[in-house]
Image: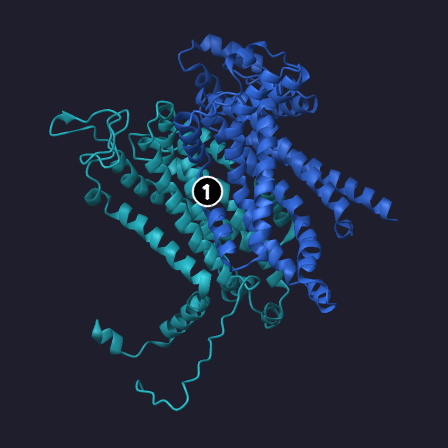
Chain colours: A cyan, B blue
Amino acid sequence: MAATASRPVPPRGRARLIAVGRATKPIREARGTARGMLWAGAALTLFFVVLAAFASFISPYGFNEYKSNGVRFAQLAHPSSAHWMGTTVLSNDVMARVVYGAQTELKVVALALVMSIAIGVPLGLLSGFFGGPLDRALVLINDVLLAFPYLLLAIVVAFLLSNSSIGAGILTAAIAITAAYVPVYFRVVRNHVVSLREEAYVDAARALGAKPWTIIRKYVFFNVVQNVPPIATLNAADAVLLLAALGFLGYGIQPTQGAEWGYDISRAVSDASSGIWWTGLFPGLAIVLLVTGLSLVGESLNETLNPVLRRRHFGRIEFPELGEERSDD
Amino acid sequence: MTGTSLRTYLLTRLALVVPMVFILLTLVFLLMRVAPGNPIQAALGGHVPPAQVKIIEHRLGFDKPLYTQYGDYLWGIVRGNFGTSISDNRPITQIITQNGAATLELTFFAMIVAIVVGVSVGLLAGRFRDTGLDVFGRMFGILIYAMPVFFLGLMAQLVFGVWLGWLPISDQASPINQALLPAHTNIMFIDAIWARNWAALWDVTKHLILPALTLGLVTAGVFIRLVRINVIRTLRDDYIEAARARGIDERKVVYTHAFKNALVPVITIVGLNFAVLLGGAVLTEETFNWPGIGHELVLYVQNRDYAAVQGIIIVFALVVVFVSMLVDFLNAYVDPRIRY
């Protein structure tokens, strides 16, 4: 480890390091509220990542377990020392379902984000750069999709896929969410590319005889891709809500495949009339905390990366007290 | 001159709606037809003899070639025929008039809650940026945004319905009123006023409070965020600086000069979020057992009823397109710059 660190960094890698440094500069420069929000959000998100990664160590029981050592758990039992968050009507441990839920939630959301970025960004790049009738057609379709309530879009896709061989499950849920978010990336990227296309440096590259592919790769892509992180984190927050909504309506993950918070809340609605609060409260709090974490990160990224909202911080200049020796240096 | 240009704008906007609706309808048709599996079998549970499936297929026109089906489908919509559900043979138009009224009632009151809460908190948070008030407003905005509608609804049911016992937690009205109130508009709130049945009106209002508040507060989260940013942006505008330079009282600058302009985009925000509100309505209806269109949609999806799902989706889409057009008209009326 020490050997690699002491070796001089090769120029290519170094350029990349500088690029990373430049890209993260606004984040490091974030001050005040934005900085607090960023760290609070990152901590919350990390908490759920840890919960998901080590679910089998953290959770006292499996998400689908209803007995241990041959003894069936009580149904709808109050929170107790054996079941910190109580049990459900199916005798499942609520805490186990909350912990394993983090796994499902993050898996689906990550898959959905990767798919929607992988489809939306290249499509936006090409459509914006080359323009023409294809661009116009894509924009029209995109506008229609954006105007549509995205929950309904996801419901329709989940409905159609659940009849197919894919069936209901993590992939179906992820595809349904992807369908809702591709238009977002497409629009942002495409509009940015259209404005970049007229920039002087792109014109200059074109005048030098650079091929379209080179221009896209070297000049346009990195400019455009900066928009993606804030949108992606905000979208991740949104996607958690969307997945929970699908689960609540019964189109998401099936209860035997994995624990899903939205599904658990839908079961809890029928418990509520008899005053049972623990089956709904804990999965709900988990959603709120995870979404809050992700949107805090997204909001503060937006506030620091978006020049319209950015506030530069000038360090306060402090003068040493006159006539006093400074001891520290 | 301005009169004609407003009219030109309206006509252009109207002309743009036609291809949009056309694309939408085509997309829905393609999605529904390209989907794998036999829709009739799916809707009827898969245990129906093939001969009977053939009969139903013939009745619904599923045995015709695809382009004929497409033509029939478009022509049907032009005539206001959105199809008939397979599972219970109910015309979609009937679903719209009966269940749509309940959805309208819910969304209307929710929108009022959202506008009142969202605009006031957003304005204050933007005006007092980076103060405690702003942090509170933003935290409220973020928290309420992070709150799934159905979770907020569930908690409201527990607190106000079960523990405090103040409000009913499901349905649109008590069974007696549902059965006896004459249905003029199907909007029970109006029907109760129509019948001058004040006891029923009170009953309907009590049923309405929790769902409308739940959906409204969740929608308000988005409003807070956008109104706040708008205020911040407006307060930086040159004309605000100019007003200050003229020595106008700071409070007057903010409350009359800035807020008014900051609120013009709110019309757009309300319009844009109408689609979000509709999505939220589906979930709210499901939570509170509210007999709206979203509630029906969920039932039909569970029954795998393609025709009904298709019809309801089209209605939702048309409503969204119509509202966004309305918003553009309003904007053009309020803000002359939009008309070019």
Callout 1: SS: helix
Amino acid identity at mark 1: Thr
Furthest-right residue in this view = B1
The x, y position of residue A282, in whole percent, is 33, 37
Residue B29 lies, in percent from the top left, at 57, 29
Label 1 resides on the chain identified as: A
Q: Residue A294: x, y in percent?
A: 41, 50
Instruction: Tell me where residue B286 appears, x and y as whole percent.
Output: 47, 26
Q: In which quarter of the image is residue A257?
A: top left
- Left or right placement of residue B122 versus residue B79 in this view: left
Q: Is residue A223 visible in the rendered structure shown here? A: yes
Which residue sits at x=60%, y=41%?
A: B116
Vertical relation: A172 (above or below) A36: above
Q: In which quarter of the image is residue B190?
A: top right
From the viewer's perspective, is A27 left or right of B307?
left
Instruction: Identify the residue position indicated by label 1 in the image.
Output: A178
User: Does residue A129 appear anywhere in the picture?
Assistant: no
Q: Position of A113 compared to B104: left or right?
A: left
